[in-house]
Amino acid sequence: MVKICCIGAGYVGGPTMAVIALKCPEIEVAVVDISVSRITAWNSDTLPIYEPGLDEVVKKCRGKNLFFSTDVEKHVSEADIVFVSVNTPTKTQGLGAGKAADLTYWESAARMIADVSKSNKIVVEKSTVPVKTAEAIEKILTHNSKGIDFQILSNPEFLAEGTAIQDLFNPDRVLIGGRETPEGQKAIAALRDVYAHWVPVDRIICSNLWSAELSKLAANAFLAQRISSVNAMSALCEATGADVSQVSHAVGKDTRIGPKFLNASVGFGGSCFQKDILNLVYICECNGLPEVANYWKQVIKINDYQKTRFVNRIVSSMFNTVSGKKIAILGFAFKKDTGDTRETPAIDVCKGLLGDKALLSIYDPQVNEEQIQRDLAMKKFDWDHPVHLQPMSPTSIKQVNVVWDAYAATKDAHGVCILTEWDEFKTLDYQRIYDDMRKPAFIFDGRNVVDEAKLRAIGFIVYSIGKPLDQWLKDMPAVA
């Protein structure tokens, strides 16, 4: 029986291994992590991450050929294929601070694999890592190998949160990079055979190691670039009276461009986009390509500009101050159908409003109070370290109140900010919300989910990103 072990029971490791176990009943799959609380959650009825369809997959396989354990060394030593899916945060100090990936957790995983292995292994990079990481890992393994043969593969994940299970069941492509040696090709074939249980062979792309590593960074950079492009257009639309939704629709009808990732918003979030672009920037700088580095930096600059612009618009619309005013925040996750708050634009928007002494009342159907308080108190990049290495219990912010109902959040509020495109926000009783708010009542739609004409008819002053401005907003321009 082939045995697979995955180090790291997070957003990538957990769902990926669950689907492999479901599709390959003859393979034994173990997901290991040093976090006892996380493994306990994976073995319970309340999984540590929210992902549509994940519960069913885990419950079908758990205890049969899918196991979650804190006994890392036992499962690694027994495995034929070891996936490494550990945190690769952005460095906060030292060489490359603010851009380079911190490979501390990756390196310690590699050293542990070398220490406990008693048989040949295929080691698979699953975390998003900088180009040439495989080479570094290979050196650690071969210098500590005790005669054991390790083959390194890069198998980047291309999952989108909220649709991860669907993406795993029916991927656009599976990418496997390996050495161009007979042993390397044999390792590629072994992993390809696992995926071929359910993925058509023509969707399994095999490449060299460096191409596979760079493809992941490039894919995320291209996607983030599209979001920043449409967000840059949204600022121009507001200035000229154009409607960004109409512009996006017209542009997306061009088959060379296509309609995806052309929704203007308050900005992109998630664990990968910013981190991967910073990584790409650092790699370009290290390879003497400053012009290329600056090109990709601009994608992040526009994203930061969009969040700042949104906050400025709120403050300037409300008589240039939100001090002491209750502002309702609807949505905190970085997108709908996930509880993930990593790099969510809501953090920067909330911090901007708190900086102006606003009182925030926050509602998100999937994010709890502890997570929100932690996010708002945490330093940049701290979120990407394992939970047990994050600051313990951050001081909760007094100006923030987390509630479990949109109507409680908006009662007596001066303004409402929609920061996540949860479907339920489209169908709220906005007449009821208006009646319970202070007047003038403002709605700042950071995801363009509401029908602004209907809300204006109720009496709201509405700001939707990239849409023609309300007369009120024209009279109170946002100063950047």
Image (spheres, helix red, strand yellow):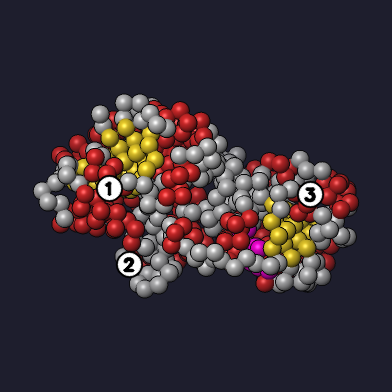
Residue drawn at 39 percent across, 57 percent down: 88
Secondary structure under the numbered disc 3 in the rendered image:
helix
Classify the position of the C terminus by image quarter: bottom right
The alpha-carbon separation of the residues under discs 3 and 1 comes to: 49 Å
Q: Earlier in the sequence, mark 3 or mark 2?
A: 2
Q: Position of residue 349 (x, y in %)?
A: 65, 62
Secondary structure under the numbered disc 2 in the rendered image:
helix
Q: Where is 282 relative to 115, above or below?
A: below
Q: Is residue 215 visible?
A: no
Q: Which mark is residue 407?
A: 3
Residue drawn at 29 percent across, 58 percent down: 108
* Near-viewer residue (371 or 241): 371
The alpha-carbon separation of the residues under discs 2 and 1 comes to: 36 Å
Q: Which mark is residue 375?
A: none
Q: Earlier in the sequence, mark 2 or mark 1?
A: 1
Determine which residue is flagged by label 1.
Answer: 73
Write down the region rendered in magenta: 346-354
**Which one is closest to the eye, mark 3 or mark 2?**
3
Left or right: where does residue 449 sit relative to residue 386? right
Determine which residue is flagged by label 2.
Answer: 286
Q: Are marks 3 and 2 in contact (CB under 8 Å)?
A: no
Callout 1 crowding tier (Cα within 10 Å): few <14, some 14–19, many ≥20: some
Q: Position of residue 208 (x, y in %)?
A: 26, 45
Callout 3 crowding tier (Cα within 10 Å): few <14, some 14–19, many ≥20: some
